[in-house]
Amino acid sequence: MTEHDRQTPAPARAPGLLRVRMARGSAPWLLPAFALVLVLAAASAAVPALLFAAVAAGALALALVWFFRDPDRVAAGAGFACAADGVVQSIDDQSDGRTRVAVFMNPLNVHVNRAPLEGAVTRIEHRPGGFRPAFDKDSERNERVIWTFQTEIGEVTVVQIAGAMVRRIVPYLTEGKQVEKGQRIGLIRFGSRVDVYLPAGVAPAVEVGQKVRAGETRLDRD
């Protein structure tokens, strides 16, 4: 587990001081947004009308901070941990006996995804594709990253699927790395979907329409 992933108590801080962890891979969006705010604010001294533009840019920058937030999580105590924040979109039986649990993330959800079980990353496959809305049936042809984990109960697959506004999936790990349950594995920028394939014989504990949290919500039942 990386230093970034360790669950440690938050340091003491003065009342009212906000501490927000930003997701890895967010800098290409956050830095230009805040730079624009500073430029417009400085220019407004000479052109007062630019103050309104600076305020609008500031609102956009804060929205990006909200989107790219990356809160610490304590992993579910037993079974599979959910890989994504969001709402369970579908639960489908597969021809090989597995069960696919698809979680849709809207732009207000945390978009850092997490490993469902402890194990090793044996394969990371990137497949280029389109950018249909993640809730659309045609999203099956969207760009995606397919993770294969070797765990104590066998292979487990997690699929990060790009959505309509997404142009990049950012993996945090490489093949061969060990991973702990609930550890951060990557980021999908903006609305998207994450599928977890439960092995044959493992029954889901969630239901369609249920809100779930990455790392904390248990996906399977005893």
Image (spheres, helix red, strand yellow):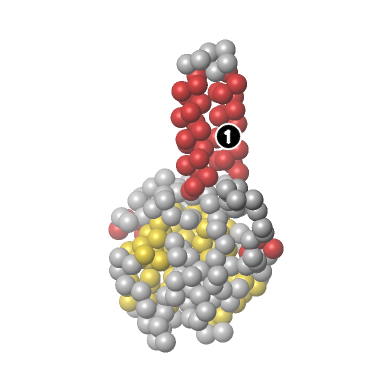
Q: Against 59, is 142 above or below?
A: below
Residue farthest front in this picture: 15
Counting from the top left corner in percent of width and height, residue 98 is at: 39, 79
Of residue 129 and residue 174, the one placed in the foreground of this image is 174
Residue 93: name its quadrant: bottom left
Label 1 crowd (10 A; few <14 / some 14-19 / many >=20) = some
Q: Give the structural element (helix, strand or loop) at label 1.
A: helix
Of residue 160 and residue 52, the one placed in the foreground of this image is 52
Residue at image location 55% in from the left, 55% down from the top: 70
Residue at image location 65% in from the left, 73% down from the top: 178
Counting from the top left corner in percent of width and height, residue 110 is at: 48, 56
Q: Is residue 103 visible?
A: yes
Badge 1 is on which residue? 34
Residue at image location 42% in from the left, 87% down from the top: 222
Residue 92: name its quadrant: bottom left
Q: Quadrant of the N terminus?
A: bottom right
Q: Is residue 12 left or right of residue 153?
A: right
Residue at image location 44% in from the left, 58% down from the top: 161
Q: Is residue 156 visible?
A: no
Counting from the top left corner in percent of width and height, residue 168 is at: 51, 49
Counting from the top left corner in percent of width and height, residue 11 is at: 67, 59
Q: Name the kind of residue labelled 1 in the image.
A: Phe
